[in-house]
Image (cartoon, grey):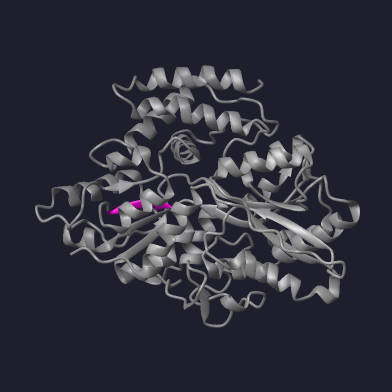
Amino acid sequence: MARRLTAAALSLLSLLALASCTGKDAPEQPQGAADPPRIVVASGRDVTGKNGIRQQLIDAWNAREGEHGYRARLVELPGSADQQRSQLLGALQSGGAEYDVVNLDVTWIPEFAAAGLIRPLTGAAVKSPDDIIEAVDRTSFWDGERYAVPFNSDVGLLYYRKDHLREAGASQAELGRGVTWADLRELIDAVNDDPTKPENYQEGWTTQLAAYEGRTVNAIEAFASAVPDFALTDEDGRYTADEAQLTAGVTELRERTASPYMLDESSGFREAESLSAFAEGRTTFLRHWPYVYPALYETYKEELGVTRLPGKAVLGGQNLAVTSNTSEQRAAKAAELIAFLTDPDSERCLLRAGFAATRTSAYRNPGGTPECRHASAYSGGASASPTGESAEVKAPDGLADGVSYSRDVLLPSLSEAVQRPRTPLYGAVTQTLITELGALYGHRPPGDAQVAKNLDEALSEVLPG
C-alpha cells in the first residue's frame, strides 16, 4: 500500500522544485553610517530550507561581531547551478557585484581561479587542513595553489525500499557495502516478476538524466566504473581519454539506463522529479544525494534503505573562496569568516542538517548525532526541517547489522569518490557530454561505438591535448 508523504518530504520536494526556477536575489538590507562593515557571501539556495544551516552559521559568526568587527550577509542566488555560475561569472568579471566570498561548485574552482576571479588563500582561511577528507580537499586547488576551502561535500548514494524487496521474495532486503550493478539488476528482476507488485510501482530505479549536470554526473560514474583509473583530463586540464575508453563507458551507461530496469521518464528527470518518483513508490531504487535521507526516512522509517552506490560515485559539493575584487582588508576578514564556516564544529552542524561534512572528525561518533555548538537550531536534540523549522532528528545513523550511515556509508563514499574533469573549460566539457550523450535517449539511438566516436571528436575540439 502506498504511503502518504509527510509534510517534511513534501516541503523538500517543493524546495527542490523552487531551486530549479528563477527567483529574486535576497533583498538588500539598509546600512546606516553606524553599521559595521559587511562581508557579503554569495551562494546557491540552501537545501535545508529557509533560515537553514548556512544562515545559522552566518548568524553564529555575526554573534561574535565584537571579536572581529564585521558582519556577514548571505545572498542566495536564484536559478539552477548553471544559471548561478553564469550570474557569478558575469558579476565578478564586470565588478558589478560586491561579493567578498563565493560558494562555488567544486567543478568551478579551476575556471574561476584561471580567470583571476578568486584569489589564492593563505593558511588563515583553513583550520586543521589534515582533518579535511583528502579527496574532498583536492577540489580546492588549481595549478598547485589553494583557492578555496571545502564547505559542504556531496556524493551519490543508493536509496531503496526494503518492503519492495521483501514482498517480492528477493534474495536480500538489506543491501551491504558490496552491492554491484549485477546484484541490482537481479533484485529489480525479482520485483518486476512479482505478480503482486507494490501499488504505483513501474520500474526498478531512477536517477537524474535530463539535459543538465545530472547527466554528466551519471556518465562519469558509469565511465569510471567501466574503465579503471578513468579520467577525461589530466591535472593540467589536457584531454587524456580515448575512443576505446569512451566506448566502454557509453556501453556501461546504456546498460544502467536501459529498460526494463530504469524508469523511462528518468531521461528527463532532475533531482526533484527523481525524488518524487521514488517517494511515490514508482521505483524500488534511487540514486540521489545525502541531503534527502532525513525526509525520506521520515516518510518510510525502517522500510527505507541507504547504502553506497554500486561502482564509482561522483564527488559533488561546494567550496568557499574569496573574490579578487574585494579589498585586502576585507579579504583578510573574509578568510577569517571562511575559517569559521568550515571549522570542525561547523562541519558537525552541516552533517546534522543533512549535508555531507568535509572533515573526518565529523564522522567519529557513529551511532549518535555529532555535537553542534555554532547553530542553535541544530544543537542538542533538534535539527532543522526542510521548512526551516526546528524538528527532532529522525534519520538514524545506525543501520542494519551494526552498519553506521556516517562511518560506513557516507565517509568511505566521499573518500573514494571520483572527480569530474578538472579544467577551466569545464562548462564547455559538461555541455559537450550532455549534448553528445543525449543521443542515447533519443529516437533510434546510434550504437555505442558511434556515440563514443562523436564524443571523442567533440571533446578533442573543446580541450587542449
What is the x, y in percent for residue 44? 60, 52
Residue that appears at 30% across and 43% down: 182
**Taking 231 as reference, is 373 above or below it?**
below
Residue extending farthest to the bottom is 380
Residue 127 visible in the snapshot: no
Q: Quadrant of the C terminus?
A: top right
Q: Is residue 262 left or right of residue 196?
A: right
* 46 magenta-colored: no
Residue extending farthest to the left is 195
What is the x, y in percent for residue 62? 75, 71
Q: Is residue 329 left or right of residue 280?
A: right
What is the x, y in percent for residue 158? 39, 54
Query: Where does the magenta region start and end?
Result: 284-288
Residue that appears at 47% across and 77% down: 391
Residue that appears at 83% across and 45% down: 325
Instruction: Name the residue nearer the viewer: 183 or 68.
Output: 68
Corner quadrant of residue 55? bottom right
Instruction: Name the residue nearer the viewer: 21 or 1.
Output: 21
